[in-house]
Amino acid sequence: MARTSNRWRLTATGMVTAVALALALALPAGPAQAADGTAPPPLTNGFGLTQVDTAVGGPTNFTITVTTPEVAGKHHIKIILPSGYYGDPNRRYPVLYFLHGSPDDPIQQNYPALTTSDSMITVIPDGGARGWYANWLNQKTQLGAQNWENFHLKQVIPFIDANLRTIPTKKARAVAGVSMGGFGALHYAQVRPDLFSQTASLSGDIDLSVRSMDLRLAVVASVTDALGAICGSSSGACDPDNSPYKPGVDSDALFGSPYPVFNADWRWNEVDPAAHMDKLAGIGISIYVGNGGGVPTEPEFWLEGAAQHVKDSMDALGMPYHYVDYGDGSTWGTQCNGGHNGGCWEQDLRDLIPRLERAFAS
């Protein structure tokens, strides 16, 4: 099972299927200004974030590296500024927080569509190979601190507002993501509806209920490094030493027991986006998904069912939304085959970004 530039691919059934699926304006104006015409702008540490290493990139598309007590290790934050950012020092911008999938990194998020907007800032924070945009239940595994939700919502957002000329209001923030990041986008908007006016899932793991047990087990597979275990016990070409999910930790480390016995899985139900769509009342919601050509060994096949469950929930609540099921991708741009891949997500973003710009401008 080879790691791709955007997530993982499915190669079998059963547990292997799960493994592959896993695979306010009162603030002062931000001081960031490019030192010259080629370098990223200097940013000031704060809100628990300390910059380390050297920023990489140019003045409008660059990546910084930070450390935080909330999550062990070093973490990239990719920032894309509008091309006219430095030309009008009095202009402020809305912000799109874009959440990557598993097991990716911000530096791999090179969708051309993300660089097309001249009216908003895009911020791509590290979500870890299998951080799942959550504060883990067990903070004492080999992985160390895993408070991803705190990192993003309590540190990254105020850090960006303090350093860049943002419009620091709910109306001017959106959160969107692909795959694991699709879960994160809906989850963050549900736990902090005061922060975001728009949310979008692109092929997201947005139903973690028992009815979508395959998706729940995919999350467990990433946490426990089931990929490495399966590779290690197989005679195929996959290499357990190169698993992006090492070291594996206990299946209960993220949200407690995933198994629906005597309500032991209540934490999973608590964070299941499909079960709490009512919390997104008043927030613009966009859902994009394909069907993988109807092939059960393609992740998008399972994610289409999850997206349909979310749609059913919104319909029952009478909620407005933007829903695109592009099926096999034949009518969705020139690079989409309906699968779980960047070609489809690029087309999703080409549809989403202009819609966000219109919402921000309204």
Image: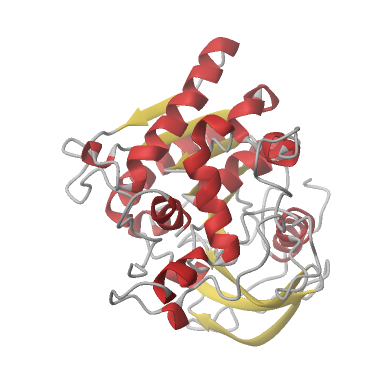
What residue is at 63 percent from the left and 79 percent from the top? Answer: 65
Residue 330 or residue 18, whichever sits in front = 18
Indicate the position of residue 263 as horizontal and vertical percent values. Answer: 75, 33
Q: Is residue 57 visible?
A: yes
What residue is at 63 percent from the left and 27 percent from the top? Answer: 275
Above or below — where is 353 with respect to 287? Answer: below
Indicate the position of residue 110 as horizontal and vertical percent values. Answer: 39, 65
What residue is at 28 percent from the left and 77 percent from the top? Answer: 237
Residue 321 or residue 304, whichever sits in front = 304
Q: Is residue 176 visible?
A: no
In the image: residue 70, left or right of residue 227: right
Count the labels in the image.
0
For residue 42, which quarter of the picture? Answer: bottom right
Quarter the C terminus occupies: top right
Residue 111 or residue 296, whichever sits in front = 296
What residue is at 44 percent from the left and 52 percent from the top? Answer: 15
Above or below — where is 288 with respect to 25? Answer: above
Q: Find the residue positioned furthest to the bottom.
A: 53
Above or below — where is 160 with respect to 318? Answer: below
Indicate the position of residue 44 as horizontal and vertical percent values. Answer: 76, 75
